[in-house]
Structures are given as structure tokens and as C-alpha cells.
Image (cartoon, coloured by chain):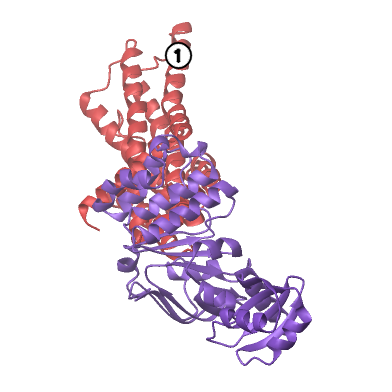
Amino acid sequence: MNVIETEGLTKRFGERTAVEGVDLAVPGGCAFGFLGPNGAGKTTLIRMLLGLTHASAGTMSMLGMPVPERRAQALARVGAIVEQPGFHAHLTGRENLRIVAAARGPEARPRIGPALERVGLADRADERVKGYSLGMKQRLGVARCLLADPELLILDEPANGLDPGGIIEFRLMIRDLVEQEGRTVFLSSHLLDEVEKTCDHAAIVDRGRIVTQGAIADLAADGRNELIVGCDDPGLAAAVLDGYSGIRDVRRSPDGLRLTLAPGRDGAAAVNTLLVEAGVSVNRLEPVRHSLEERFLEITTRLGVEA
Amino acid sequence: MNPIVARQMIGAEFLKLRKKRGLVGWALLLAAGSVVIYLGVKAMQHSSNPFERPPAGGERGFERTLELLGFFMVPLAAILIGAEAGAGDRANGVFRDLVVTGRSRVALFLVRLPGALMLTFVVVGVAFLLAVGGVFLFAGGDPTPSLALVAKAAAWSALANGVVCIVAVGLASLIGSRPATITALVGWQLVASPMLLQSGSLGRAREVLLDGAFSQIKPGLRGGEPVLGMSIAAVVISIVLWIVIASAVGAWRTATENA
């Protein structure tokens, strides 16, 4: 089941269109990255989902409930951090959670202790938030989300301002929330590396439009299946492989020969056999790992050229 | 919103306010501190010149002290508290996090009122107790106020400061800024309202002023010295209008603003 669905979602600020006709489908039980450069419309879309601002056009639903029509029921099982989490600095972490638990309802208050334990803040919960680091505030923000016992967590740029240690810690926590607790995490980010390491699925957004969405591995590879071949005679190897039907393209690269295999073909063994039988000594045969970063830059550069 | 949730949310509002040491300190200084200073100065003046200076306390002293409690310094404490209650969530970036709980925005506004009133009444209560203590302590040869007068004065002080607090919550929720709310209301309370009240050319239009209404019902030896001579119905209408309009604009803004 999709936990978030939007159709033709649009937000205009006067003449400027921040989000344009977005069709988004976020599957349940995964970490979903909403990836795009700054100003792409990520936060605006999140704000519309949460009812913080009105949509200009289109429909949306969360946890199967249309919003804004059933916003209150949907948000009862959603935890969200929009931009930086805000707290009353003069109150302790625990007191800040009490404020939100009161608004959530009586069932939320007993969750304060476990939520603080869950994010590793139980020892510091009775200190004032003004003394918290940014990483601790982010974790307290997640604890606040957990007061809803959420099926869906929406985190807007959660890694912003965190140091490398904090980013790793946060990433592990998100993976735990998904894998151990079965929750869905929707996180927006402009950090490609972060989305790639944290998420199972992603959508790439640029200038208010969804460019592509799907499983991370599929997005990064974009259907390409490539091999790097290292050998003693690249010229002979290229000639041998050029006529092979399972290979679409053969190029020389600094790493060796770069082969693009035909779709659906797992050709490493066949390539090795062909080369060895032709007398080529193979010292390297490695699938190319495509990064989301390459794909992201490719897409956004292309869009930039079009514009 | 069911009563349990309402009680919890009001408790949360009170928690936010009472834990703000700076706010509580300033509110107590303005309310209780001003009463102590006023009575202390009056007592010293009386002791240095008992024939020309009346006692600080007694019935007459009590009546004068009520001016402080209902019109001047203590309402400033109510303004501080109301402004914090109305704009504090927004100033701390917490309003958005409360909205995403799914709780109605109008409910988020409405619970600010009792939360702020609770702290206001505590502060006013402290100031009032000090005032009553001082009035009895420094009565000199004057008669002390009766229990009935003290009770009426307590209710009057609570009402006058409670309404000012509600106006501050509403205005702060409307404009979203504590400093702007405090500046506007302090200017109104200490300068504009007293001036308008004394402007005879405004005639009955002055009946909309809160100070006019509270002056009319201020308890005292002669049943108060009303400036305007308003009817009780006009007093009630004036007070209710201020409460309703302040609450309505605050609720409207809280319900419609982008969080």
C-alpha cells in the first residue's frame, strides 16, 4: 500500500510555481528519499501534505486518507519534522515532549519515556534544550514524532547541520525505524549520498516537478548494466567482444574496457569465456556500480540545458 | 476536544509560561515590586510628615493601591504574560510542530487563554496579597478595609488584569510578535487609554475603553469615582466586546496563517 499519494499536486505563490503537477507514490515499509536541489519544492510539498499550507491544485492522501479532508485522522499516525525542529529552549527535552503529547492526546504521554530511550536521549532528557547540540535537537525531534506511534515519519532535511558522526547516527536510526519497527520514513534531502545510503526508494525533484522515481538501484543504473574488463590486450579484447550479441557497446576507459550489456543479460561469465578462448588474459571483471549522484547530476544538468 | 485533552493542553500552556524565569521574574517585579515600592514610599512620606501625608494604608490607601493593581503596573505584567502566550509558540518555532499533530488550530489558540490567565492570576494574587498586607500594616489611624471590600477588590483586580491578558493573547496571536504586542499595549495602557478617557470631546465613545468600564466598577469607599458614569449594561458590553474581539482575531489568525 502507498502511504503517500499525490496527483497533479500544484502550489503557486503568485506568478511563481513552486510545485507543479506532482504525481508521487510512496510505498509503505521503506525509507523513501525525496531528493532535489535547494529550492526544488521539497519543503513546499511536505508543507502541503501536512496542512501547513494549502495546495493550489491536485489531490493528495496519506495512509489511505484524503487530505486535507481527513487531515486530523491521518496526522494522528504521522510524525513530522519540517525544516529545523523547534523547541522551547527554556524547557527540558522531556517537558518539550509533554507539550506535544498534550496536543496528541492522553495515549501519547506514556510514550515520552520510551521515545527518549529510543533516540538515546534518556540521560539528557531533564536538561534544558538550550544546552542541546543540533544533533540532540534532531533526535529530540524524532522522539517527538514517535509520540504518535507513527506509521509514517516525514523528515525534512534531517541531516542539515549534522557533523559526519551525527549523520551516520541519524542514518542508522532511520534504518532501524524502517527495518526493526516497520515504519515508513519519507525524508527530503539535497544530499545525494545521504539518500543513497539511507533510502530504499527515491524520487528526484527539480524545479517543482518529479523527474523520476523508483527503487534507488534502478534509479541509479537507469536500466544500464555495465562491466569493467581489465586485460593484457584491450585492442584484441575489444575486437572479440564487438561482435558478441549480448553486448550493446564497448568503450575504452582509464579503468580498462567498459562494456554495456544488453538488457536482462548477466554476461560476466560469457565475456570471460569469450576472452579466454581468444587468448586474452583477463585480470579484472567487475560490474559498474552506478551512483545516484551521477544520475542526479545527469538529470538536473539535462533539465538545465532544456531550460 | 475532550476534557482530558483540554486539561492536558491547558496544563502544557501553563508549564511553558511558568517555567520561563525571565517572564515570571519581570511579571512579579512589575506587579508585586511596584506595590511594595509604592506602599513603602507612601509609608516613608507619612512617617516623615504625618500631618500633610496620609497613611499609606487604610481604606483610602487601599483605594489608591487599587489604581496600581487595575490600571497601571499590574496590567503590564498581564500584558507580558499574554504576549508570551500568544506569540511564544511561533517565536520558538514550535507552532508548526503543534499543527502537524492534527489538533485543531482554533483549539491551539483557545488553550492559550486559560494557560495565560492562570499565571496572570498567580502574579496578580501575589501583588494583591502584598497590597492587602501593606494596607493593614500601614493603616496608621485610618480604618482598615472590610473583608467585603477586600473580596470585591480581589475580584475586580482579577477581572481587570484577566481581560488585559486576554487582549494581549489575542493581539500577540494576531501579529505574531511579542515585542510589538508589548510595545503597543503598554503604550495603550499607560498613555493612549488614560488620555482618551480624559478627552471630554469624545463623549460616550469613551465607553468602549476598558479603563472607563473598570473605573466604573472599581470598588471603593464611595462605590468608586467613575469618570464616565456608565451603566452596568454598558460596562458589561464593553468588557465582553474586548474579550470577544481579541479572542476572535487571535483565533482567526491562528487558524489561517501559514505555519
Picture coordinates of residue A158, whole percent (x, y): 52, 56
Q: Is residue A92 above or below residue A76?
A: above
Mark 1 nearby-residue class (10 Å; few <14, some 14–19, many ≥20):
some
Q: From where the camera sits, is residue B241 visible? A: no
| Residue at 35% across, 37% down | B119
Q: Is residue B214 above or below residue A138?
A: above
- In the rendered picture, chain B carries what hue? red
| Residue at 37% across, 41% down | A95
In screen coordinates, is A148 left or right of A190?
left
Count the marks.
1
Q: From where the camera sits, is residue B143 visible? A: yes
Picture coordinates of residue A303, whole percent (x, y): 68, 80
- In the rendered picture, chain A carries what hue? purple
| Residue at 28% across, 51% down | A108
Residue type, mark 1 in image: Arg
In screen coordinates, is A281 left or right of A269?
right
On the rendered image, what quadrant is the N terminus of chain B found in?
Answer: bottom left
Disc 1 designates what residue?
A: B53
**In this orientation, which residue lies closer to the viewer: A2 or B222?**
A2
Q: Chain of mark 1?
A: B
Picture quadrant where residue B50 is located: top left
Picture coordinates of residue A92, whole percent (x, y): 42, 38
**In this orientation, which residue lies closer to the viewer: B223 or A109?**
A109
